[in-house]
Image (cartoon, rainbow, N blue to C red):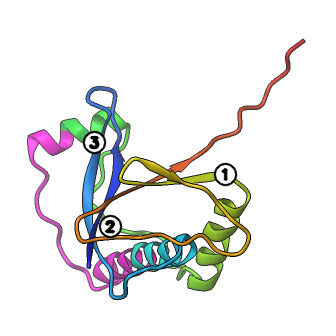
Amino acid sequence: MEININIKNMGKKGRRIQPVPFEYEKIPSTAEELIEETVKIMVNNFINRQKWSEEGHVPDPLTEERIKSMAEIGKVAFGYVYNDKKPDMKKAVDTALLAYEDGMVRLFINGEEVEFKKEGTSVSLGEGDEVTFVRLAMLAGRIW
């Protein structure tokens, strides 16, 4: 099943959210399963990029447009992963689920917020639905 995950495009100009298609092996029936499957997809993509870098693949040359886009973000890179430490899938999933349970991450499906429930939050997803994860950042500071 293909679901579109809205991902923020970084940069000074044109900060916008773009849907990126994700292919799910199984259809998630709860918010927790959706988070778990999404984290697994992202971790597997990272591991594949690590393998690609380790195997010595030569990246495509950067276009002028891509260099400008990366310069706006503040980092021009070829896509290599220099960190050889393998991610822990279970720890990544547990961290994401804890952030959702603690309210640090909000989940929206087709623009509607999915509220967290202790007994498991059921979700209904269809082909091509849009999912947005919003990570809330706590600001530190003093009032006085």
| Tag shown at residue 123 | none
Q: Mark 2 points at which residue?
A: 80
Q: Nearer the viewer, residue 16 or 113?
A: 113
> Which quadrant does the N terminus fall into?
bottom left
Q: What stretch is highlighted in magenta?
A: 43-67
User: Along the horizontal axis of the image, is 43 left or right of 143?
Assistant: left
Q: Name the residue under label 1.
A: 104
Is label 1 or label 2 in front?
1
Residue 38 placement: quadrant: bottom left
| Mark 2, secondary structure of its residue | loop
Q: In this view, does 140 lie above or below 96?
A: above
Q: Which of 88 and 2 is in front in this view?
A: 2
Query: Which amino acid, by three-letter code, is at mark 1?
Result: Met
The residue drawn where x is 71% and y is 32% is: 139
Q: Mark 3 points at which residue?
A: 70
Question: Is residue 55 part of the magenta span, yes or no?
Answer: yes
Residue 124 placement: quadrant: bottom left
Q: Are marks 1 and 2 in contact (CB under 8 Å)?
A: no
The residue drawn where x is 37% and y is 82% is: 27
Is label 3 or label 2 in front?
3
Magenta span: predominant SS is helix
